[in-house]
Image (cartoon, rainbow, N blue to C red):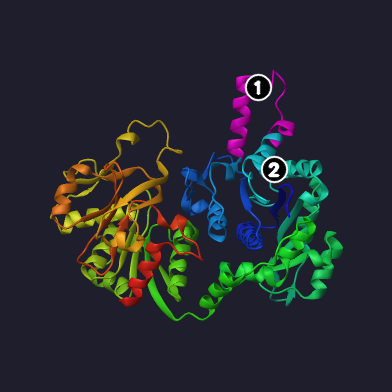
Amino acid sequence: MVRSIKYIFVTGGVISSLGKGISAAAIGALLELRGLRVSFVKLDPYINVDPGTMNPLQHGEVYVTDDGAETDMDLGHYERFTHTKTGQANNCTAGRIYHRVITKERRGDYLGGTVQVIPHITDEIQQVFLDGTRDCDVAIVEVGGTVGDIESLPFLEAIRQFRVQKPRNDVINIHVALVPYIKTADELKTKPTQHSVAALRQIGIQPDILLCRGEREMPGDIRRKLALFCNVREDCIFGARDVESIYMMPTYFRSQSLDAKITELLNIWSREPDTEPWDRIVNIIRHPDSRVDIALVGKYVKLRESYKSLIEALNHGGFANACRVDLHCIDSEELETMSDEGVAGCLGKMDGILVPGGFGVRGTEGKIRAIRYAREHSIPFFGICLGMQMALVEFARHVCGWSDACSSEFDEASAHPVIHRMASQENLQGKGGTMRLGAYLCDLAEGSLARKIYNKPRISERHRHRYEVNNALRPALAEAGAIFSGISPDGSHVEIFELSQHPWYICTQFHPEYQSKPTDAHPLFASFIAAALRK
């Protein structure tokens, strides 16, 4: 039984990209299986107000919530691994914290007092802990970056203060640090973790649990050494080695009884978790019934995390069909300069082709070539956001015969702007948070493929875009064979475009990948992979 909210703070040391987000999500999954309600907050020390205007090649994907928040990609992990719903309150940056404090100062809330990092910034950070974690039993708060970064110091100080104010068994700190394997010495090295924990302790935070990230399992002597030098009990030191798939982490942590140790430290009584759903996924990963080759044609492919939710949703579609998805990331810019034979050689062996979203004209002609190949060679095709828009441009050019068809985003002089800017997007003063964002309703046409896949007349999906299908050209496009099978309830926005004379061809203006889970694949992705298997 849980009588008050318990807090787990997750920090990281040595280097970034150690898997703090995956670890936090996997821990949340195990606690949820124990019957506990979990919630998450991600704190990002960068000064941007949110990641909405950041380059995907630098930051990775922007995850979008139902309420329209543009957030860090780790919120996607939280939602995929658990049943929690995140929103604006679940992701906060240093930029947003400072903006709130400065706004209060300008308004006179501090009554003329000197505004300082302590207590004003740290108090505001602690308020974020509270605002983002209501109505739960366990709140998991992850701090981005690494211990020792200048920008993360106020967040860590806020955690230190918060921990002092709470009862002993209400707060624990889990620290993720690197234990690298040095091949030439044939040894695991503990010094990076020792220094990381020392830096954390200098701030005033003693970790309760260590998650040791590395390529290999830790032998007992390494665990004992870390316990001695990091002042952490040996039974509170856990391995976090590389695994075949992130979806093995819940069962991997469960095999070490990490969840049992967490509930012990937090003084929580709960049932034993039933990991059967995760065991089934692990079995599919290790022993798939079949394999399928999917081409992802985009312009951010040099950093796969730019398409993190999309790639995971494809994997979920594979799990739903007991198959492995072999993903082939193809740079759309490279397709632009290829010969027709080169395009055929690149795409001809694929079982399915997916063109995702993006911004700007770069690589769009390559996307159009991939879409045309999929349409003309009856390869299952899935277009998302900009992928849908380019599919309609391709249809207009090569089926309707409008050779100059384009999006007004890229060619304002086109006589056939099949995609154009929404009226609500005219005369905007800034870019951040100004797109069509969050969940919107969509009505599905009777008899359409989309209606068959969803098996219901109305759906809700998340959006992140600024341009829409041009309603003035909809009748002519429909007369040529375009099926607008998903429309907003007021009839003003096209949400789904499909073709009937094709094995599987669906394009969505929204991003269905944001609502897919490994244990519950989004129906569009499950159907797309099933169609690819039939090819």
Residue 67 against residue 372 in the figure, above or below: above
The image shows residue 250 at horizontal and vertical percentages of 63, 67
**Residue 349 magenta-highlighted:** no
Question: Could you tell whether 6 is left or right of 461 in the image?
Answer: right
The image shows residue 283 at horizontal and vertical percentages of 54, 78
The image shows residue 62 at horizontal and vertical percentages of 48, 50
Instruction: Tell me, yes or no, if residue 403 can be seen here.
Output: no
Q: Which label sits on residue 477? A: none
Under circle 2, the secondary element is: helix
Q: Nearer the viewer, mark 1 or mark 2?
A: 1
How far is disc 1 from disc 2 in space, using C-alphas? Answer: 22 Å
Count of numbered labels shown in the rendering: 2
Between residues 469 and 289, which one lies in front from this camera angle? 289
Q: Which label sits on residue 155? A: 2
The three-letter code of the residue at mark 1 reads: Asp
Give me the residue at 30% from left, 57% from top: 507
- For label 1, the residue is 109
Circle nearer the N terminus (1, 2): 1
Between residues 305 and 81, which one lies in front from this camera angle? 81
Give me the residue at 68% from left, 76% from top: 183
**Which contiguous range is marked in magenta?**
94-122
Between residues 136 and 53, which one lies in front from this camera angle? 136
Question: Could you tell whether 362 is left or right of 326 in the image?
Answer: left
